[in-house]
Image (cartoon, rainbow, N blue to C red):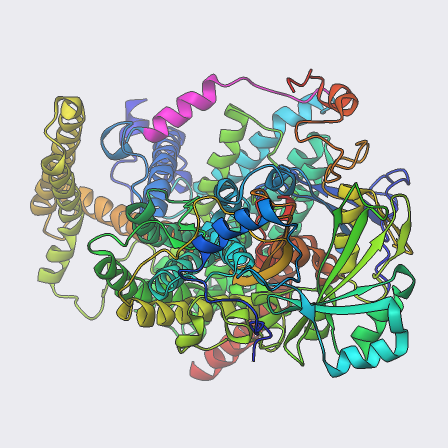
Amino acid sequence: MADEVKSPAPPPPEGEKKPAVEERAAAAASAPAKPTAPAKPAGPVPVPWTSPLVEKYRSQYGSGLDAQTYLGQNYLTVERSLIPNILRLLRDEEQFDYCVDITAVHYPNREKQFDMIWNLYSFARNERVRVKTQIADGASIPSSVSIWPTANWLEREVYDMFGIQFDGHPDLKRILLPDGWKGHPLRKDYGILQQDQEWVQINLGIESGQ
Amino acid sequence: MNDRSNLDLDAPATPYLDSNELIINMGPQHPATHGVLRVILKLDGEKVLGTECVIGYLHRGVEKIGENRTYTMFNPYVDRMDYVAAVSNGLGYCEAVEKLMNVEAPARAKYIRVVLTELNRIASHQLWLGTHALDIGAMTPLFYTFRDREEILKIFERYCGARLTTHAFRIGGCQYETYAGFEKDVKNFLSFVAPKIDEYEALLTTNRIWLERTKNVGVISGADCIALGVTGPVLRASGVQWDLRKAQPYAAYSEFDFEIPIGTNGDTYDRYLVRMAEMRQSLRIIEQAVNGIPEGPIMAKVPKVIKPPVGEIYHSIEAPKGELGYFIVSDGSTQPYRLRVRPPSFVNLQALDRMVRGLLVADVIAVIGTIDIVLGEVDR
Amino acid sequence: MPNFIMSYLGSTVTPGEAGNQFWALIYVFIIFTGVSVAVMAMNWLERKALAHFQIRLGPMRVGPHGLLQPIADALKLMLKEDIIPTEADQFVFWVAPLIGLLAAFAVYTVIPFGPSQAVSDMNIGILFMLGVSSLGVLGVVVAGWASNSHYPLIGALRSSAQMVSYEVAMGLAVVSAILMTSLNEQGTGTLSMIGIVQAQQRQGVWFIFKFFPLGLIAFVIFAIAMVAETNRAPFDMAEAESELTAGYHTEYSGLRWSLFMLAEYAAMIAVSSIAVALWLGGWMRPFPNLLHAPVWDFIFSLFPALTFFGLAAIAVVGVVRMPSHSFFRIQRVGLAGFAALLAFIALLLLVIAVAGRSADTSLAARFREGIDYVYWFVLKVAVFMYLFIWYRATWPRYRFDQLMRVGWKVLLPISLGVLILTAIVGVVAS
């Protein structure tokens, strides 16, 4: 059975979208829209996720762990200190043996600028879970290579694109960009047309038009 | 599991005649690396001790571009990643955004999507078969598969105007209604290609030389596959019966009756058999789908300007290469805040090192072919 | 002097045996021209047949249906820049293709196109052939060495290892065929090529069918070994493009490279000739014993003419199917001319066949006999050429270690077994 259970709140898609958009515009003009306010027939909202797994870890880690569901997808928001323990527990005890993806999101206006996201899947349970944590710019995070070998290249790409260091990674170097490239492109302060002019000049010998 | 890279690339290259170890570079331009891929091999005579893949030659910054385009504008970009199976890429993206918007495509659109996606799966596997056989030395299947693939590309061209980068789907459904004669064309194709697949099998499956080149070459166990995150036919050939179309069905797949072929040894031959069987199962799905396309709208009620609510979504589909996933973070505006593509070829290519230890150089080329990578997807 | 020339004409032995150098030179010239033409035809056939196997057409523009393509290729290669690597050993680089060519062409002195249609019938003919064709290995190694680059050297060493390994199995298969010449008849065992074919004639059976299935197995072993000997698919790992080591002729360009290709095709024809002479009855027509009435002799003697008529008919069909656009006019004319030439040759052969239909020693009869002998021999060799192309189109290639394993661990034991069994059966049967 798929884990894509539609959460009880959202309205049926047809016929409601147009009024919702207009209403949202009206509502935004009139009152600050709160994500959890059920006053307008707005879209889905994150709701707390309850399950035996969550109970177990909440009792173990208490406030460091927050479990929510959005659009039927479960995710845990954990404190940075819980990584890598929570990941290891998820793999060993909860059978989340397949690490689907490791990625990051950059929020430059936040104090802890990066969201690290591990996307996990369990073959036995046919369930997905996302583990999110927030880290500051310049902070490093323990590598998951010892938990899932697939993390090797995935973390290298996160390092390449965001500049997040992974402790304990066997071979942390750039993967998609050339070795001598300066800058981490997926950060929000890296422009869409920006390039490492120096590298281009030295290695390609051209004056990039951009 | 220690995944430490054991290539000591800073050491000076030893003269090949004196010592046994040799570092050889394959690519980035090489007839057999299926694109711009550089593989550095450390050899002991002829045996491979370790490999290192250098990728990024085709990196175009698709994820960064995604943050600077609206959702609708980004739709054509996804075709260019796995350009061989562009329809699947489009399906994954459109479904991910639809999920984020909490809309569902109408039934007719879902059926059309299934038909086109499965046709694309067959086309992708045919291209894989031709190039893989060519790498191993059989030159004729290439021409046969490309010739038969033309029929699929003709159907795509009649449907949406493009053969390769089709941009077939839109967020909320399909833009184009099926053209007059679509069902007939697809049914003709089904009867046309079934004996052709038998022909490919007749050329290769029981051929002594093919068996010797592919059996027990590039063996990877199911547990290793799961640990390395390998999905798709590679995983299934290692014995793990897992297919997203059955495990977490999307787009009308739950209404069709088909099987998931698996292999036993996890070697190149099993991957070949699995992909051949998958082609046949795709024919089954297409037949069921095209015979039962329901009437109705092809587009859901989606606003002209797509502005999903704040939130994140991860949606993945079973692309011909493996699990293709889209992780989209929306900040409520018309452009995604973060658009991450989880590429199956990228993760599968990681397993190359594990698969070629102890093999000979000629086998490395066979294994790269059997993983079925497309560099557009590896590098994005 | 004219006496020296004319005295050979009534002879029933080869010029070499008759000691007639003039005619030997004429024969050498004819064979050299013939083989060169055959190599060009083989080039054309390979491209066309391979293309048709792969559902495409092959060369169609250079001459009607690409018939002039080999000439265009030869011209192009001759006009190409002759690149010699600066670090290469200049003399050795120059001489390497010549060694290969020499080895491939020297073999033709003993190939029996007929009972007296050979340059020289040495009484160690088969030994000479095996020995000289082994010299081709030297050409390969020298070419790889002279290139002064380690990829060609590795490719050359691999090619040479492959050729040497398969020569062992080849040799043993040849020995079992030779054994068959000496069994069942006292004192007629012979190594001479013409003698081997005549032994088949006398024994009334082609050696491929003798002591069934031993003759067949020996033939099959030779057929496989000869493909490996000439570095053709499926044993062409050493020169495949998608592998790392690109083959011993990487550094060669232009005319020198074409010499290697010439040597390869010539070697293919040479080893096929050995197979035909040893097992397939050489110049003998099919069913010499089953259908031995004079009327059958006459019917089979019409085959050369019929073949050329058939080829002319195919050319005429090609002319008819040519698009009737002015762009194709010259191709139509060319192909029609070619059809006319073929028809003319067919007519000539028909006249000779009819005029010489009696089995006496008149000039026409001797002409007819000679043409028949050469025709059947060449036809059988042509079948082998087609098989070479067919193998290349169909099968993947063996990995190098698998190739060596097949040569040493499969073919060698089987050929040894066949040899021993042939000897036992031969002694028991006589």
Residue B217 drawn at (x, y percent): 64, 65
Give the image location of residue B326, x and y in percent: 60, 55
In magenta segment, residue C71: yes
**Does B300 sit left or right of B67 as displayed?**
left
Q: Which quadrant is the C terminus of chain A positioned in?
A: top right
Quadrant where the image shows the N terminus of chain A:
bottom right
Front-lying residue, C293 or B165? B165
Asked whether, in this view, residue C271 is left or right of residue C8, the answer is right
Quarter of the view holding residue B258: bottom left
Look at the image and give the residue range highlighted in magenta.
Answer: C69-86
Q: C90 above or below B64?
A: above
Kindly tell me whether residue C228 is visible in this rendering.
yes
**Above or below B348: residue A139:** above
- Please name whichever residue, C64 or A74, is drawn nearer the observer in this view of the structure: A74
Q: Is-magenta flag for residue C153? A: no
Q: Looking at the picture, how far across and down is residue B266, in whole percent? A: 63, 71
Where residue A7 sits: x, y (%)? 58, 72
Judge whether residue C124 can be spotted in this image: no
Q: Identify the residue at image location x=72%, y=78%.
A: A50
Q: How many marks overall?
A: 0
| Residue in the image at 63% along x and 73% along y | B238
